[in-house]
Image (cartoon, rainbow, N blue to C red):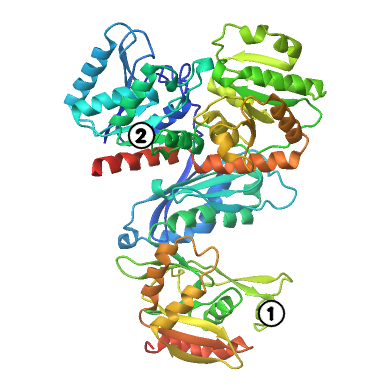
Amino acid sequence: MRIAILLHGGVDRSGERHVIHGFLWLIERLAGRHEVHVFSRDQEPDPDDWTLLGADVHNTGTKRGWRTRLFSTFANEHKVAPFHVIHGIFPWGGTYGALLGARYHLPVLFHAAGGEFVDLPDIAYGTGTTSRGRAALRIALLGARRVTVASAPMQRLAAAHGVDAEVVPIGVALDRWPPMAPRHRDPRRPARLLHVGDLRPVKDQPTLLAAMNLLREHDAKFQLDMVGVDTMNGTLQRGDVARTLGNNIRWHGHLCHEALRRLMSDADVLLVTSRHEAGPIVALEAAVLGVPTVGTAVGHVSEWAPRAAIAVPVGDAEGLARETIALLDDEERRLDIANEAQRRAVSIDADYTATAFERIYDELQDR
Amino acid sequence: MRHDPLLRATTLEYETTLPVLGIETRFETNSAAVMDVVDESFGRWRQVHDATHCGTQSVRVRVVVSDGREESTSRSPITHVSGPGKRLVLQSHGSIGVVDPLRRESIAFVTSELVDDRANFRVAMLEAITLALLACFDRHPVHAAAITRGERTALLAGPSGSGKSTLAYLAHSAGIHVLSDDHVWVQTEPDCRIWGSAPHARLLSESAAHFPEVVHTGSEKVVVPLRPHEETHRLIAHEPVVCVLSRGERAMLEPIPSDEVESELVQQLTPGFDRFPERNADVVRRISQRGGWRLTLSGNPHDALPLLNRVIDGNWP
């Protein structure tokens, strides 16, 4: 099968920086069985082609004329051998996938992987916040024969917009990210807490820091590792709460996947504070490594609670602090949750994801 | 060495391919100890080299071993939980495996401590992930012992404790070949075949008391090796007749019609054999279509031997 994936970015030629590992694992699996072409726009400012994990990446670049380049590159590849299906991911991929699908009469699968059905105007997050975003989403939905999302809460958001979406989680590649057994915590050392996510408003790190401050006031011994690119120019680190927490927090910035794995392997709890997540895949990665998640009721955290994760309301720093302390004080429960989370994450690994999408591609062609 | 941004997958340097249940099964592992257990569990399938038995596409079983301990104070229990997409997840407090029939493979990540617990690893992890995978490909598990002589095969069906293993051992002692003392896999296409591999019979200690040659170990079940009557163990039989076991005052044998055999087998469906309910009815109908026997067992298993001979040698009911 010849598959065209439209993904605005996350497919850097390094395979390390500016990538989304869940999608790389998917691309690698699909490319092992099919001919896969990835069309991106934002990966590099200049247009270029490269090979990544067996797939051909065509980056149109962001410079003037990128739309023309996208359509002509797609046309050239389609002329060499026709594509069988277009798979658009995120709003950009969905919108331009729909346009290309209409032009070449190709079936389109749209995977809504971010803020497609969300409207958070106070932080300007979600396609619903602008008329341009709403129009783009409308095009994506009109052009797609099938819509998929990563989690049940995201499916409910889609349903609220009148969209019948199928859940296809973006799973972890077990051969690349092998499982580790949930481990007993060493009570003599400070609890190792981990947060992974770029520093940006939708991840709501102020709630995380507020919760950590409550932990500190509670005399809890902990170390918080913060991993992620700072998109806010140090605002968070310069704030009063962060300064109060001082050495309780280690700010790592971006880490390569290998370094992240080392840090995660050593963690006792993953903390998620996002106001919205379609996944998040980091909760699955942590689960595979035997690390349970305490977080806001979004995505997998919400659908797995209470047996395989602990969820608190969005923005509830007190709840997050209380549940984190409770989990750290109850080792048996922490391990039970970690075991259940691992079982669930393994049952929806990257092979499951690839098989699910392959089934949908087949169904789209059978129509 | 080239940098691998996705993290390098573990090299599985040990590999072998065996036609387990007649399906080419490729085992890959990074552990010599695991390969040794593979040979112990499935090595006897090497004798199946008839290509007609191996018409199905191959499957892959991977076992990745890492240094580590099971986070459990007692022997690590391994749970089996069905997942989405017909998947099956096996998990202990340290090891985890997933059976993925849609991709025709399974992978397990196990601790060295579990592998060192050889019997537990062999039965509860390696054999479980392999057979659970194979069961997805026209190899339907049926809770029955199977005995065979010449071209004749009888399935001895009954719930746990009904006497399957005892009869299998009795049959073995009388020179009848035993395909399995507890469960078999039924293949339905292109014709009905019974696959089994039982190097042992597991006798309840009270049943073992009827056989003076069996050495009692004091445990609840006595494992007795079944040495092959021929050069090699038979692993396959065709078109069986079903013999439903029951208990009574005296041993007796009576023919029963196909619908009664079918009804008995459906009623006897036990956990572990109910993974494919949609397929079970067809398989049961297939093996019941000739009708069968009801074999009533008395307190002394030896009373059943002449009746077993009648089943295995006689005409169809």
Between residues B186 and B67, which one lies in front from this camera angle?
B186
Q: Quadrant of the C terminus of chain A?
A: top left
Q: In the displayed structure, would residue A91 be above or below residue A162?
A: above
Q: Does residue B207 show up?
A: yes
Above or below B233: residue A283: above
Question: Do residues under tags 1 and 2 come within 8 Å of each other at their CB atoms?
Answer: no
The residue labelled by disc 2 is: A30
Residue located beneath label 1 in the image: B206
| Residue B54 found in image quarter | bottom left
Q: Chain of mark 2?
A: A
Q: Residue at x 44, y 70 (%)?
A: B234
Local crowd size for mark 1, using a 10 Å CA cut-off: few (<14), some (14–19), many (≥20): few
Q: Is residue A225 visible?
A: no
Three-letter residue code for mark 1: Glu
Query: For this rendering, which residue is in front, A41 or A208?
Result: A208
Q: Quadrant of residue A142?
A: top left
Q: Is residue B273 left or right of residue A1?
A: right
Q: Residue at horizontal 49%, vertical 30%?
A: A278
Where on the picture, by quarter, is residue A255? top right
* Percent position of residue A152, x then y: 49, 39
Q: Position of residue A48 (x, y in %)?
A: 31, 12
Amino acid type, label 2: Leu
